[in-house]
């Protein structure tokens, strides 16, 4: 694959970059901090036994849409074309934190939904212009039902999941494979300090699951996979039960 990854500086994005470098995929990393990006690129090169400097980087900030086109353009140029774009970048805060800080809540909604969709639109056009490819984006199980502990974060991911589902319906026949990743709880910086529930996942295992899903062209990937079953139950719970429980 010739892949650009937005979000490879931490967590599941970093694990994915390492796993892809190890199996020989060609990578270009996008993110908001140039120094962090360089560090992550050198790390992925070392994992993949690549020459230092062989993985390029460009600044791309989900709060600054004007960075999207130049960053994707730089990736296309460095890799001699792109066939895969992966987005793991996103913001999180607990429902209590978001209710107490409306400015951050607004930022989160813009980053996780509006600007991620705008970035995907830029990536989609470029992939379709070359005959297709894979657009893999991290949403969340938090977007599957309206849930008390993730009302705002979950809403941002619900919107994103719906957009990705529609993109898959609209463009798969034209060669665009849209992969919507729905992680359950995964132990990364994002969830530091939160009590891990049963079935909490590790970033490296999630990366392997996601890569298998990308290779198979699955439209939806739950990671860890057990969350597919958990969410099947949650999706079918009656509303009065959802109102009672604290899940
Ligand atoms: N961890 C979980 O339990 C869990 C569960 C469900 C869904 N998810 C979703 O899975 C994805 C990855 O989560 P994670 O746990 O790996 O998160 P993480 O470790 O916190 O990493 C988040 C990444 O997003 C980047 N980012 C944040 N704001 C950005 C911006 N404005 N522009 C560009 N990049 C930005 C960060 O870059 P910096 O290095 O610059 O901060 C970092 O690389 C997220 O979309 C998250 O919502 C996570």
Image: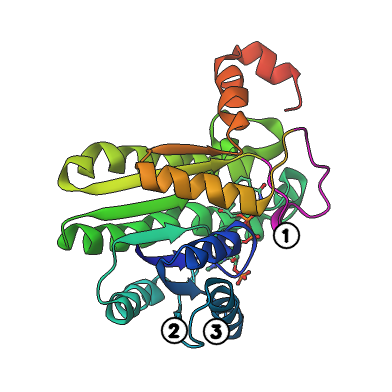
Q: Is residue 26 above or below residue 54?
A: above
Provide the secondary structure element on which disc 1 rests.
helix
Report the side of 186 relative to 143 (left or right).
right
Q: Is residue 210 visible?
A: yes
Mark closer to the chain start, 2 or 1: 2
Report the disc number at residue 189.
1
Q: Is residue 38 above or below residue 232?
A: below
Provide the secondary structure element on which disc 3 rests.
helix
Report the side of 26 relative to 95 (left or right).
left
**Magenta region, residue range:** 185-198
Q: Position of residue 214 (x, y in %)?
A: 40, 47
- Closer to us: 145 or 176: 176
Judge whether residue 24 is colored magenta: no
State yes or no: discs 2 and 1 in contact (Cβ < 8 Å).
no
Report the side of 129 relative to 195 (left or right).
left
Looking at the rendering, in which quadrant would you find the N terminus?
bottom left
Judge whether residue 195 is colored magenta: yes
Q: Is residue 114 above or below residue 165?
A: below
Q: Which residue is mark 3?
A: 34
* Mark 3–mark 1 distance (CA, rounded to whole Å): 19 Å
Q: Which residue is mark 2?
A: 54
- Around disc 3, counting alpha carbons within 10 Å, would you say few (fewer than 14), some (14 to 19), or many (20 or more)? some
Q: Is mark 2 within 8 Å of ligand 1?
A: no
Determine the residue positioned at 29% across, 62% down: 83
Mark closer to the chain start, 2 or 3: 3
Determine the residue positioned at 43% across, 37% down: 220
Looking at the rendering, in which quadrant would you find the C terminus?
top right
* Mark 2–mark 3 distance (CA, rounded to whole Å): 16 Å
Determine the residue positioned at 55% across, 28% down: 228
Ligand 1 resides in the quarter of the picture at bottom right
* Mark 2–mark 1 distance (CA, rounded to whole Å): 27 Å
């Amino acid at each position: 694959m010739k892949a650009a990854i937005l979000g490879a500086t931490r967590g599941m994005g970093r694990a994915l970059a390492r796993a892809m470098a190890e199996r020989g995929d060609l990578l270009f990393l996008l993110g908001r901090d140039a120094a962090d990006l360089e560090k992550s690129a050198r790390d992925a090169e070392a994992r993949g036994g690549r020459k230092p400097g062989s993985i390029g980087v460009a600044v791309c900030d989900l709060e600054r849409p004007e960075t999207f086109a130049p960053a994707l353009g730089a990736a296309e140029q460095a890799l001699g074309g792109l066939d895969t774009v992966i987005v793991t970048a996103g913001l999180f805060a607990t429902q209590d934190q978001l209710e107490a800080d409306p400015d951050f809540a607004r930022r989160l909604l813009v980053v996780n939904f509006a600007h991620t969709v705008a970035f995907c639109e830029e990536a989609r056009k470029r992939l379709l212009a070359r005959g297709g490819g894979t657009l893999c984006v991290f949403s969340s199980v938090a977007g599957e039902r309206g849930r008390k502990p993730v009302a705002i974060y979950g809403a941002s991911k619900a919107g994103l999941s719906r957009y990705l589902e529609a993109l898959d319906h609209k463009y798969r026949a034209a060669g665009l494979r849209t992969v919507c990743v729905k992680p359950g709880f995964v132990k990364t910086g994002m969830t530091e300090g939160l009590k891990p529930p049963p079935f909490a996942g590790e970033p490296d295992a999630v990366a392997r699951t996601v890569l298998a899903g990308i290779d198979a062209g699955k439209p939806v990937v739950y990671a860890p996979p057990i969350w597919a079953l958990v969410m099947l139950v949650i999706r079918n719970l009656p509303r009065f039960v959802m109102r009672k429980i604290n899940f």
